[in-house]
Amino acid sequence: MTAKKTGYFTHPDCRRHDMGQGHPECPQRLDAINDRLLASGLLPLLEPREAPLAATSDLERAHERLYLAALRGLAQEVDEQMQAGGPDHAHLDADTAMNIHTWSAAQRAAGAALAATDAVMAGELENAFCAIRPPGHHACRERAMGFCFINNVAVAARHALDRHGLQRVAVVDFDVHHGNGTEDILAGDERVLMVGIFQHPLYPFCGDVPRGANMVNLPVTAYTRGPEIRALIEREWMPRLEAFRPEMIFISAGFDAHRDDDLGRLGLLEDDYAWITRRLQDVARRHAGGRIVSCLEGGYNLGALGRSVEAHVRELAELA
Ligand SMILES: [Zn+2]
């Protein structure tokens, strides 16, 4: 039997972060992914890895020290407030809340991205998918928002540059929402090329004007469908990625641009996610020795999420 080439990084703590009844960014998202990968027979063909806790020094590559201390303090406060019979959540914005498990879940999520990067850089794996939550791409340098606390992809990209000595990494974001946090952290960092496509206008209502020359932002209107999105990606992302010659590719893999997802109004289907993954693999093979680390962001229709992740991971593992 040949070695498994694709890692599957996750941790039970990522399930314990819970923002309350009815919140779309719910623990069941990870169950939907796991169940689908299991039912489709794909899971046993992946290399399972348990995510470690990220160290604060790793998180500081993308976030302010005081912001991280404030998050830790808030986690402590929720604990004390619960002991005193108070509420079991603390809100950071209207739809982003911490419970007593959020901080460890966030450390595991970033830890997954970091460990995946290490394993791929060491050549133990060709690529990896991180089934993690909380997601990260709205988390700014010193602000949590939009269900996100720690920017997993930005932390891992900086780790690849600073710790592994890479000179050029690409960040690709196909979530239906603009990855404003990643842009906040990485805009102007010439070692990074970030390409994104997102519905606009839609939360977080920015990104139509890129904040740096290293940002390729493609805002598209509601009801844009797969064929148009593929054409845009082919025309706008691919030449930039080819010219940049990334040594590694990080993916903010949000699946809420799926036609069946109610948080956005785009029309991607499972086949579109497979196609995007193949195009990114082409770039990775030509320039990066195949190195890709993909991290879960959005995706809130549980059925569509499971099927889309399956399509994405099947391509990563070349089991399509
Ligand atoms: Zn999203």
Image (spheres, rainbow, N blue to C red):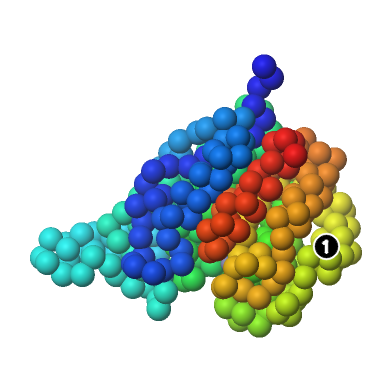
- Screen quadrant of the C terminus: top right
Q: Residue furthest front?
A: 39
Where is residue 114? Give x, y as percent.
Answer: 53, 43
Q: Quick check: is the Cβ at mark 1 less than 8 Å away from ligand 1? A: no
* Kind of residue sitting beneath label 1: Arg
Residue plotted at (81% across, 50% down):
279
**Residue 129: percent from left, percent from top:** 60, 43
The image quarter in which residue 228 lies: bottom right
Label 1 crowd bin: few (<14), some (14–19), many (20+), radius 10 Å:
some
Whole-percent x, y for residue 203 in the image: 57, 78
- Which one is nearer the viewer's eye here, 252 or 298? 298
Residue 213, visible in the rendered structure: no
- Viewer-closest of 5 and 183: 5
Q: Tell me what residue is drawn at x 66 percent, y 43 percent.
A: 313
Residue on which the image places disc 1: 230
Q: Specify whether 289 is left or right of 7.
A: right
For ligand 1, give the image quadrant. Answer: bottom right
For this view, does 40 lie left or right of residue 109? right
Give x and y (percent) for residue 212: 71, 70
Residue at (67%, 16%) from the top-left corner? 1
